[in-house]
């Protein structure tokens, strides 16, 4: 469903009908240019490609700098090893290793699934310019992955200090299929 607030966002308009949710206009000082739907999909395909390297839950993410198109970090789910290492947090840690704890406001995280409460909170605290995901929590759940039923946008909206954006549903047909196929394989 597209909320009325989503229609007020230029990023949401650019992203088109595939959106499932969108909140919070960007901070005016942000260093991220408008991102086209084609670029959203291009970056999401990088996250999808990362998910091929996962073993259990096929979650993965990349962090890109839209101004240059540079991939700043990659991450895949490794929660068998460490419960904190969801794909998104693994990507945050890779970003810090490679780039230091800085310039988050120039970067956007692309992930094949809606971030859980832990991961979205970390992204808020980092001050990342935006989060873009494919499958919703419901879509991931249909693929057999359990997350707290708290929407990532609710974390963003509850964080009045945070000015980043969140967009869902980019290439969701493809990302939903990844979770469903993995669930069927594990039966
Ligand atoms: Zn998570």
Image (cartoon, rainbow, N blue to C red):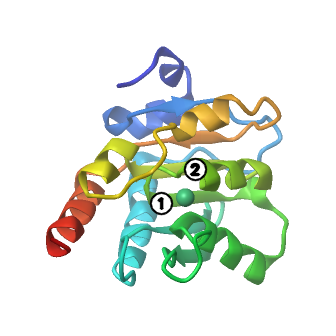
Local SS, label 2: strand
Asked whether residue 171 appears in the rendered view, the answer is no
Q: Quadrant of the C terminus?
A: bottom left
Q: Please determine whether, in this image, residue 160 is positioned above or below residue 101.
A: above
Q: Quadrant of the N terminus?
A: top left
Q: Is mark 2 within 8 Å of ligand 1?
A: no
Label placed on residue 111: 1
Along the viewing direction, whichever of 67 and 172 lies nearer the viewer: 172
Q: CA distance from mark 1 to mark 2?
A: 8 Å
**Against 146, is 161 above or below?**
above
Horizontal arrangement in the rendering, residue 184 relative to residue 16 (left or right): left
Residue 51 placement: quadrant: bottom left
The numbered mark at residue 131 is 2
Q: Residue at x 23, y 51 (%)?
A: 173
Instruction: Mark 1: give few (<14), some (14-19) or many (20+) Cα within 10 Å.
Output: many
Q: Are marks 1 and 2 in contact (CB under 8 Å)?
A: yes
Tell me where residue 26 appears, x and y as whole percent: 70, 35
Ligand 1 quarter of the rendering: bottom right
């Amino acid at each position: 469903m597209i909320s009325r607030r989503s229609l007020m966002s230029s990023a949401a308009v650019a992203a088109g009908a595939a959106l499932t949710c969108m909140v919070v206009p960007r901070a005016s000082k942000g260093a991220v240019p408008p991102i086209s739907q084609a670029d959203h999909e291009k970056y999401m395909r990088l996250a999808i490609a990362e998910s091929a390297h996962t073993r259990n839950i096929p979650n993965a993410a990349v962090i890109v700098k839209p101004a240059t198109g540079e991939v700043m970090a990659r991450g895949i789910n490794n929660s068998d090893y460490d419960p904190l290492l969801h794909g998104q947090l693994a990507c945050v840690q890779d970003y810090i290793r490679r780039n230091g704890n800085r310039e988050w406001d120039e970067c956007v995280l692309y992930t094949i699934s809606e971030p859980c409460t832990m991961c979205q909170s970390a992204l808020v605290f980092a001050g990342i310019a935006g989060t873009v995901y494919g499958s919703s929590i419901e879509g991931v759940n249909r693929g057999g992955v359990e997350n707290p039923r708290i929407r990532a946008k609710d974390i963003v909206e509850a964080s009045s200090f945070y000015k980043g954006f969140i967009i869902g549903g980019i290439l969701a047909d493809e990302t939903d299929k990844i979770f469903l196929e993995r669930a069927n394989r594990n039966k």
